Structures are given as C-alpha cells and as structure tokens.
Amino acid sequence: MFSMNLFAEGLNPRPFDSNYRCYSVSMFPSSDKKTVEDGGKIMMPPSALEMLTRLNVEYPMMFKLTNHRSKRKTHCGVLEFVADEGRIYIPYWMMRNLLLDEGDSVQVQSVSVPVATFSKFEPQNVEFLDISNPKAVLENALRNFACLTTDDVIAINYNDRIYEMRVLEVKPGNAVSIIECDMNVEFAAPVGYQEPERRPNTAASAATQSAEDEEEHSVLSAAAVAAQGSDGYLAFQGAGSRLDGKKKNLLTPLKELVQNVELKRGIPDYNYEPGYIKYWRKNTARSATPSDAADSGSFDAFQGEGTSMRQSKSKK
C-alpha cells in the first residue's frame, strides 16, 4: 500500500506554494549581501528546502513571485536556504518590479519555464553606450540570474555603477530559463537616446560648396600669378583640415592675407644632381683690422684678449 501511494504521488506531483514576508537584501543579517543584490536569485528559509525535497520539483528550481495587491509577478531562482523562518530576502530591483515594501506578503510558487532562445533589452540610460563591449558585460552579469521575465527591469553592476535594463522580449515564452542555454541577445535604443542630426545633401548645398571651392581656388591662383610676376613666393598655399570635421577658423581672410604678405622668391639650384646634398654658406670677407670692420659695419667674433689666472713660469 505504501509503494502504491508513492507511485500515485509521482503521477500527480504537487507544486511548492507558500506565502512569506518579503525583505530586501539590505535587511539580511549577513556580510555577504552583494552576491544576492547583483543577481536574480533569492534567499529562502530551511523549512522551504525540507518541503521541496518531499515534493516532485524539477531542477534547477524556479519560482514565481506574485504580489496580489499590485497584480505584479516575476520569476527567480534560489541561492541559499539560510533565511529566517517565514521570511525571504530578494534583490532591491525585484522589490521595485513587484511594488513591494519591507515586510509585505508575497506568494512563492515553484514553476517550470522553457529554456531561452532569444532576448531583447532596453537600457534605461544613455550612459550604457559608454561601455565598449555591452554584450560581454551583459553576458557576465546574467551568470547570476536563473531566469528572465518580460517587462522586468533588471539591474547589473559594472565598474561600481548600476545599469538598469528592461526586458522587452524573451522567447519562447514570457518567462524563460537562462541556465546553460544558447540565447541570442539584441539591444534596443536606450531611453532618451537621440539620433545625431544629419545635414541634407541637397543640390543647393552642393552648388554652394562648389562655389566656395571655386572662389578659394581662384584666390590661390591669383596669388600664385602675382607671386610669379613680382618675383615673389607665397608659402603654405594648401588648405587645412581638422580631425573632428569642423571648418578651419582663419583669423585673417585669404584675400586680405595675400595682399598683406610680402612675396619673396628663392633662387632654384639649376645644377642640382640627384643623390647629392649641397650646403650653401654666405661668404663674407673678414676685415683686416677692427677699425676696418667698424667702418664697413661687419662684425668679427672673438677679437678680445684672454687673461689666465695662473701665471706663466717664464714670468717668474
């Protein structure tokens, strides 16, 4: 008769269903609170483990938390069975999703959810775009989660900063398990994100730009002709470019700059031979005497007399 009762119980498994007082992880009497806060698992009392071992539940254990007052629900896993009797401790982001206060009653039921194949997240802040590899960061954070529920706003910790992500969509159901699964991840545009403005490439703007380019080219050509006619040389005739794409800001317009610059032209070396370097020095005749140098206006260096502090032996 005892064996028949066990067989009948196996055919009709009883789910775990109990009500507990809910508290945030900050109320948990332990120093290791960060492990619970940075994930999607809860702390349950030891009596819940004893009841679950007598029931035919599937592993890994998944639970549905329901707040009947606000008609909100979510799904989670269990981390440890070390909470006080009659209490459960859950992450703060989960309490916000369920609209729970400290000490409110919540229903905990064991459930079975399908394995995830697809998920889509919406960052709640544009600062999430500053992360260089968001998929790798999200994948590392989801290791502390057991399941995902549509429309939940989860919190992940990265570089001592909390980033909130709304679960827009999961497949193949509204709640899925993400333990040992191959899941495709997509991101929606963050909340408050605005596309950068793009300048329209119209025919009028193109004509205006070409007219400006022609005017600048004509000014440079006129400057070159003037330089050749007056035996002058105009240096730096090219146009500058900035790395950020902004237009260059010249303090002096190009037309005025051409008028004010003194044009000089160098003498080319018509006898230049490839492979040889020539050093040109200005040859100036040295003055015979200081008076001649003063009369001619030239200057000869090192013309003074030196004095030694050590007396010569020949003078003694």
Image (cartoon, rainbow, N blue to C red):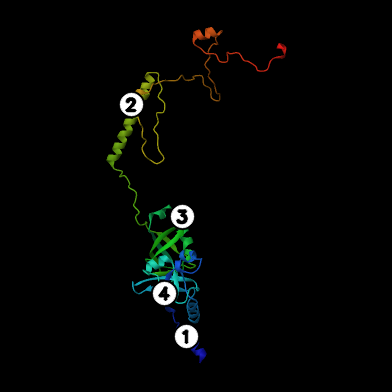
Q: Which mark is residue 256?
A: 2
Q: Which mark is residue 71?
A: none
Identify residue for label 1. Answer: 9
Q: Which mark is residue 133?
A: 3
Residue sitting at 47 percent across and 87 percent down? 8
Residue 5 x %, y %: 49, 89
Check if mark 1's residue and mark 4's residue have beta carbons within 8 Å: no
* Residue 233 found in image quarter: top left
Q: Is residue 313 above or below residue 83?
A: above
CA gap, disc 2 and disc 3: 51 Å
Q: Is residue 66 above or below residue 166?
A: below
Q: Earlier in the sequence, mark 4 or mark 2?
A: 4
Give the SS element for disc 3: loop
Give the SS element for disc 2: helix
Q: Earlier in the sequence, mark 2 or mark 3?
A: 3
Give, as a three-letter code, the residue at label 3: Asn
Residue 31 x %, y %: 51, 66
- Of badges 3 and 4, the one in the foreground is 4
Residue at the far left in the pictured view:
204
CA gap, disc 3 and disc 1: 50 Å
Identify residue for label 4. Answer: 21
Q: Earlier in the sequence, mark 3 or mark 4?
A: 4
Check if mark 4's residue and mark 2's residue have beta carbons within 8 Å: no
* Position of residue 197 in the picture relative to residue 135 (left or right): left
Residue sitting at 33 percent across and 31 percent down? 216
Give the SS element for disc 1: helix
Give, as a three-letter code, the residue at label 2: Glu
Give, as a three-letter code, the residue at label 4: Arg
Give the SS element for disc 4: strand
> Label 3: how many residues lie within 10 Å, few (<14), some (14-19) or many (20+)?
few
